[in-house]
Amino acid sequence: MSEFRGYTGKSLEFLKNNRITVGDNVKILADLTYLGIIMPRYEHSDDSHLVLKLKSGYNIGLEIEKIKKIEITSSPKKNIEKVESVEKNPNLPKILLLSTGGTIASKVDYRTGAVTPVLSAEELNSSVPELSKIANMDAEVLFSEYSENIMPEHWLKIADKLKEHSNSDYSGIIIAHGTDTMHYTSSFLSFALAGFPIPIALVGSQRSSDRASSDAALNLIGAVKFLIDCKTNGVYIVMHQDENDETIACHFGTRVRKNHTSKRGAFQTVGDDPAFIVVNEQVQRNARNNFFKVKEFQPRIKINTKVALIKYHPGYDPSLLEKIIEMNYDGIIFEGTGLGHIGKIMYGNVKKANEKGIFLGMTSQCIDGRVRMTVYESGRDLLDLGIIPLENMIPEVALVKTMWTLGNFQDRNEIKKIMLENIASELSD
Amino acid sequence: MPLESDEYFIKFLRKLRASKSELGEYDPAALFEKSKSKTIMYYANPASSCLVEQDEEPPHELDGDAKKIALIIASTLKSNIFSEIYPMRKTVVDGSNTTGFQRTMLISQGGNFEVDGKNIGIQSICLEEDAAKNLGDEGSTRKFGLERLGIPLIEIATEPFEAKPQQIKSIALGLGRILRSTKKVKRGLGSIRQDVNVSIKDGGVVIEVKGVQQLEQLEKVVEYEAKRQYGLLKISKKLQEIEWMHNNEDRRLVTEQFKKCESKIIQNAIKKNQEIVTIVFKNMRGMFGYSPYEGIRLGKEVAELVRFFGLGGVFHSDELPNYGIEEKDIQNLKEFLKINDNDAFLVLAIPFEMIDTIIDQIILRIEHIKNKGIPNDTRLATQIGETKFLRPRPGAARMYPETDIPPILTSKKELEDARKNIPKSWDESIKDLQTKYEINEQLAEQIFDSRYIELFEKIVEKTKISSIFVASILCSTITNLERSGLNANLLQNDDIVKTFELLDIGKITKESIEMIFENIMAGKAKTTEEAIKNTSIEVVNESDLEKIISEIVETNQEIVKNQKERAVGPLMGIAMKKLRGKASGEMINNLLLKNIKKKLASI
């Protein structure tokens, strides 16, 4: 932490002139006398206030102009956190937790409110002690990024790390991940690591773990129970089923979406029940089929990110599509209307794209349900223009699958075949 | 407006976990709550709460009105307002907040006010959120309603002051009057709550007592709490003279030994699958029953703690034999425990999984009393003015920044507006009322102190009814009905206004008002109209009235003959029985006199 974090201009000068840094205990004489600790300032704040944490625990902002005198009463007390190491029980199954960031893998600095990454095995065990009673937890921090900063190269990094553990004695692997783009990551892993022998659970949380009401602990406990008892493999997203701290839902990683900005039960399997649920310590199976359609582990960890996802809407400007073609994209997934349509206005550029050999796939903005392009004339026109209907694949999943397919296969016919082949339950019946 | 309703369409289950707080420590109060391992069921009505209260959505912006009022109150109390205000989270894991914390912010510090010439300092003014309503426990599940959760509260903490218990009431009243002068503070049970911190001189600790709802309670609570603190210090001193240390061997499971005991409490507990447990206290004979002041005993402290965990059965050796536990049971137990006459013991009924937690808490408390004196509690005021254990007093460790809301800035203009809105002093307000409404000082004070001041002004403005009459109905009539056991909360402001409006246009009489209010306050009618129907007090028209009066005179000819015009007295009684509320007394009197005269002339 910087000595003057958040302070700029006048306030920074004031601190420097008085030889005071963040964390110092000070006595300030202004309209009243204040005793407290100098705290960092938020980004984007003005430069005319100091933030002071009073003995009562409250933070206040004091105007520098009104400060008559400031003096240090003592230097900062360093907090040394004691983290107890946990004894492993050889009779328990082993679980690996890979942390990639997001709310679940972060800790609030209670002094400042700043969020920092954590999740060493020890910290994990001390914040969720229940875990050590059901499994021996190993933990590793891969990187620490919020959802929106996760890029395809992060997917590759996770996949490579998982591949290293494909022959390990772990009963399951947890990936702690930010929730916003978790289903993109789970989709990529599903294709890149098809047939991966050990079950994988991506776990996130919708409420930060500083609060007593956090969903993080229950999601983690649920995930560990699930991984130990599911008796199958696959890539799953494991989160609260609903608003109750009761049932944990385990969704197929290719059939799931985040359908609410903030609720605990934001994740839902599209068009079906979650594959498994964990309730009252029991793992119940709903899924009729296995997640992977291949038996053998066939890692293909490559990607081509030149794929665009176009959400068609009334008023869509076809020159945007033209631009994408000019930018040498290799694949385009349309999120079309209803059964899989885009307006006539698009046809010219679609034809161009097809002639250029760009893969064109159709999904529906209805999210749930199948595209069916033979019902209406416009659909039949689009089929003629070379658009491939992608059944009931979720648009985001179709995007990721195209990136993966184009990264691993070259032949146009083979690409089409792979795109329509059910690899990891991305198509459901 | 929040809806106070017990209709709940939404319910959901949560478990709260104590998490490490700011200083890397667990807050004692939070940890203690967690040891009760409660599952919480929340009940909500979409009309009074949303996803924010359910902790399913981040908080929205600070309510502008709440801020405005807090600034006015801070200005009124001459408190120093911070130009940057920081919303904080105060850890509370008893389930009363779905988030596990209460949002709170320090608005200002310092300031003072005067009551009866005594200057009372202000420590701080905070703006915070109200908690959920406790709906009671069901097994190990605690239930809360969300209708009140998140309603803005302004907390005003005074500097500690030394005062006699009876002075405290007038200080609280004084502060209450200042707050109500702002016209922003509603009167009514619960809208102003007092938490009182009590500490005695020499060895006392600050005990926070919550839930004092009435000023009458305040005095008693302070007195009781002072007595308890003095008593505990005496108990502490005596404990220090005793050689006692708790060992794990002092805890024994004795369910077998009590199988034949005839105590109903014990047998019920065994039936409920609870275990009977004893804790032996070496050399402690007499300590649990020792009562330095009436009602203050170590035994009671332990019983309160156990009751807090939702358990009833705890007996100490100083009170046995009793409660169906007989001498022979005690002898058996003593033999089994191999203890001598100098030792004391507790007998408890506890569900198996809670045994360690509860015994640990009991031992911790007794050790604290012995070694450090009075434990730092947050306590709850009881109806009779005593206090009972609520939870340990939380430390500073429980506060950290609310990261979902950026700091709140207070502009110069907002501060100026607040200063402009500083209300008149109490004395001035009373004088104003007197001149404006031509009422005497006593009535002005009464109406100002009542919860109906705004209603009073509204009615007087809207109608031609005399202000004295309106004030006396609002102050004394309603209060009298309340004293006779009726519920003033059933009487809605709209119905009060409606009633006066009906009087204003002559639909009802002055005498009817009490009957209407009585009907509503007794729960017999929901509205003014319904009450009028129930009591059949609609004004009768003049020709009907004439008819009724002449009939009365006719059927009571004897009285008229004998008493002449003085007959109006007894006939008035008869007429009023029939016509109460349907016509004014004056009118009845005049008509009777007229008819009597007519009758006398015709005889």
Image (cartoon, coloured by chain):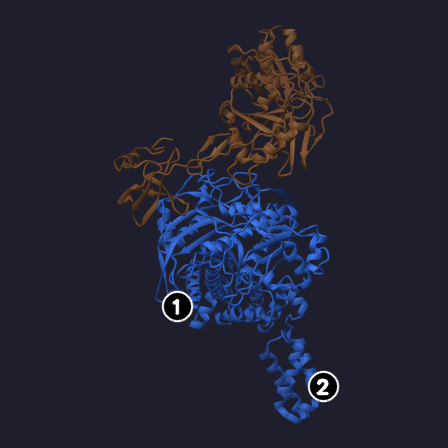
Chain colours: A brown, B blue
Look at the image and tell me in which quarter the N terminus of chain A lies.
top left
Which SS class for mark 1?
helix
**Residue A392 picture location, percent across and down:** 68, 21
Number of on-image labels:
2
Disc 1 and disc 2: Cα gap in Å? Answer: 54 Å
- Residue B330 to residue A334: above or below: below
Depth check, front residue: B258 or A59: B258
Q: What amino acid is labelled 2 in the image? A: Thr
> Is any part of residue B153 visible from this angle?
yes
Depth check, front residue: A75 or B80: A75
Dot label at residue B431: 1
**Residue A32 picture location, percent across and down:** 31, 50
- Residue B10 to residue B448: above or below: above
Residue at x 57%, y 16% (from the top left corner): A164
Dot label at residue B593: none
Depth check, front residue: B255 or B162: B255
**Residue B390 picture location, percent across and down:** 53, 54
Mark 1 and mark 2 in contact? Answer it, CB < 8 Å: no
Q: Which residue is mark 2?
A: B555
> Is any part of residue A269 visible from this angle?
no
**Residue B279 picture location, percent across and down:** 59, 53
State which tag comes first along the sequence, 1 or 2.
1
What chain does badge 2 belong to?
B
Which SS class for mark 2?
helix
What chain does badge 1 belong to?
B
Crowdedness near tag 1: few (<14), some (14–19) or many (≥20) residues, C-alpha within 10 Å: some
- Residue B134 to residue A286: above or below: below
Q: What amino acid is labelled 1 in the image? A: Lys
Look at the image and tell me in which quarter the C terminus of chain A lies.
top right
